[in-house]
Image (spheres, rainbow, N blue to C red):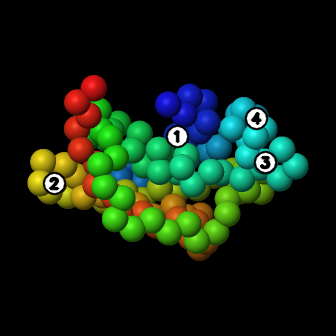
Amino acid sequence: MLENFYSIINQTIVGNTAVFAVRFNIHHPIFQGHFPAMPVVPGACLMEMVRELSSMVLGKKLQLSVAQNIKFVQVIHPDEVDTVSFDILWTEADGGYATKCLVHNEGETYAMMKVTLSESVC
């Protein structure tokens, strides 16, 4: 869904933990609308990235089924911070995946999410 919004520059997967270093594409059209004078990574895009990265790791088409706890701690300005890490931990639960994600870079935390992802029926 977020075609060309970001690129994966590094990934490590061990057991049920994945760490992705991703770089935002400052030239993506999303940033022209959010916001032209000072681009900001939308929180909804961070959530979608968790879904996309988890789908890739698990090899399944996943959808967000429950958002238990989502905290956007700091704004990401992609012209200042173009690379962040997504640390994703998942466990199988009730036919889906209880997923925790920390979005951070160089000691700065940008978002923390606890969501449930389930296999998409579409």
Q: Amino acid at mark 4?
A: His
Q: Amino acid at mark 2?
A: Glu
The alpha-carbon separation of the residues under discs 1 and 2 comes to 25 Å
- Identify the residue under disc 1: 8
Q: Which residue is mark 3?
A: 35
Task: Specify whether 78 is left or right of 59.
Answer: right
Q: Which residue is mark 2?
A: 92
Which image quadrant for residue 55?
top left
**Labelled disc at residue 27:** 4
Instruction: Residue lying at the far right in this picture: please name it.
Output: 37
- How far apart, in angstroms, are the residues tagged by discs 1 and 3? 23 Å
Q: Are marks 3 and 2 in contact (CB under 8 Å)?
A: no
Q: Is residue 74 visible?
A: yes
The nearer-to-camera label among 3 and 4 is: 3
Residue at 67% across / 63% down in the picture?
75
Percent of width and height locating residue 110: 58, 66
Using the image, determine if residue 60 lies above or below residue 69: above
Q: Is residue 82 above or below residue 31?
A: below
Secondary structure, mark 2, is strand
Q: Residues within 10 Å of mark 1 (few under 14, many from 20)?
A: some
The answer to whether residue 26 of the structure is visible from this angle is no
Q: Nearer the viewer, residue 116 or 25?
A: 116
Q: Secondary structure at mark 1?
A: strand
User: Which of labels 1 and 2 is toward the front?
Assistant: 2
3 vs 2, front mark: 3
**Which of marks 4 and 3 precedes in the sequence?**
4
Give the mark nearer the N terminus: 1 vs 2. Answer: 1
Query: Pointer 1 and pointer 3: residues touching (CB < 8 Å)?
Result: no
